[in-house]
Image (tube, coloured by chain):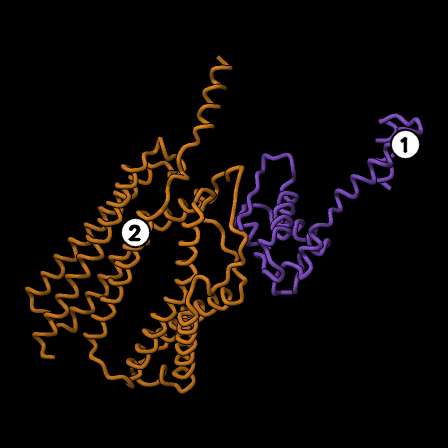
Amino acid sequence: MRISIDVTDPVPVFAQLIDQIRSAVQRGDLRPGTPLPAIRQLAADLQLNPNTVAKAYGLLERDAVIETRGRQGSFVHRDGRKHSRVNLAGQATSVMTDAIARLRGAGLTDSEIRIAFAGVMRD
Amino acid sequence: MNPHSMTLLVTAVFTAQILVMSFICPWWSHRAWLAMRRNYPTGDFPRLYPLAPEKVARQNTLVLGLHVVIGLAATVLLAFHLLHGTAARHLVVIMVWTYLVQLLPVVLRMPLLISMHRAFRAMPAPAVRSVELHHWRLTDFVPPMEIALGMSMSVLALGCCAYFYFTGHATRGPGNFLPLLIYSAAISGLLLLRMGLLVAGAVTLRRPDPYMSEADVIRGRKFRLALPFRLAMLLGLYFILMQLYVAGILRLDFVSVMAGTSILGQVMLLRATARSVRSLAARDLNAYRSDPGAAAKKEEAAAASS
């Protein structure tokens, strides 16, 4: 399975990596237990900062799409296919859309909503 | 072997050494470089020449000249000793020293090769990059038998060094071969360390340059990963035989040993040259073509500024 990134794309590189690995797991191109390349090796092959690949792997691990087995490396999670269908970012977008609609309904302007959101994120 | 046959053998090996190391290999490499410049012109393939091609050509010509001068000097030296009827035992020592001098241009070319290697790596990577999402293992590149043999030969060579050192063979009597032990132990130890790191998967292999095709990267990796194991096999066996010979356990003729050493060196250099020439011919160099989009953008920018 080939993975490809475009550094000029507005989507961050780590998100491109996550999307492609998640899709491959979902399609069954990457089966449960399939070993993934080491972070440093993938970063070297794609000429990226290892932290970028580590961030992508970390987020995929958080979503239980992949798992890390100590020094053995990273593997596709045994329930990775099921977990790859869970779209946390999509859920967050849906919750926020509802909240924004309610706030607009209550008469708040978009600027006030932005300021409130920034304040909550800061806290 | 009678003295006459010995002299004949040394003369044959010495002649082959002069031809291989000073004329055939350098000429072969130089011809490959010229062919590359002819088939892949600088204008169309700018990424193939990260260093100024004129500078590289100048250095290559200098090194080739040095090879020829050393080769001619070695030929005169051989002819002189043959005319003066030098004994085979003495001639073989001259042959080994000549071998070391013949290696000098190769060593002198190293800084250029290193700076070229660095320049290739420093090239800005293309915006779109892709790679096979595959967990490569050492055994995908090197057969397990080669891994086992390489590591075993290094361990055996180190074991021999330890045995001869602790039993006092190396330091006792007139045949002191402590320098050989130190040299063997250092080379075998370094190779064993490198092989250990490769087996443990602790080595990250970087791309030689951002534009190299995937197939060429894999081919290059195969060679780079197999090299320490093959070297360990060959050098381990050589060090063991040399130590046994110097310790007087293995009875071999001195002239034959030195002739064998020269033949081994010649074969290694021939193989290395053949490999580099063949790999250059087999590579897909289209990825190094100039970017037509970038050229068009440059023209547009020039038109806009005017």
Look at label 2 and name its amino acid.
Arg
The image quadrant that residue B246 belongs to is bottom left
Badge 1 density bin: few <14, some 14–19, many ≥20, Cα 10 Å = some
Give the x, y percent position of residue B29: 26, 49
Q: Nearer the viewer, mark 2 or mark 1?
A: 1
Q: Quadrant of residue A120?
A: top right
Residue at image point 71% right, 54% down: A83
Which residue is farthest right?
Answer: A106
Q: Secondary structure at mark 1?
A: helix
- Image position, residue B281 (x, y; %): 30, 47
Q: Along the horizontal axis of the image, is B220 left or right of B31?
A: right
Q: Residue at left 40%, top 78%? A: B156
Q: What chain does mark 1 sit on?
A: A
Residue at which label 1 appears: A103
Coordinates of residue B179 in the picture (x, y in percent): 36, 73
**Horizontal arrangement in the rendering, residue B206 relative to residue B185 (left or right):** right
Of the pair B214 and B288, the residue shown nearer to us: B214
Instruction: Please say if A84 is above or below B8.
Output: above
Please name the color used to draw chain A: purple
The residue where tag 2 is placed is B278
What quarter of the picture does the N terminus of chain B occupy? Answer: bottom left
Q: Position of residue B139 (x, y in %)?
A: 46, 65
Residue nearest the viewer, comparing B48 with B193:
B48
Q: Quadrant of residue A82?
A: bottom right
Q: Tag 2, which secondary structure?
A: helix
Q: Chain B in the picture: what colour? A: orange
Residue type (three-letter) at the residue carrying disc 1: Leu
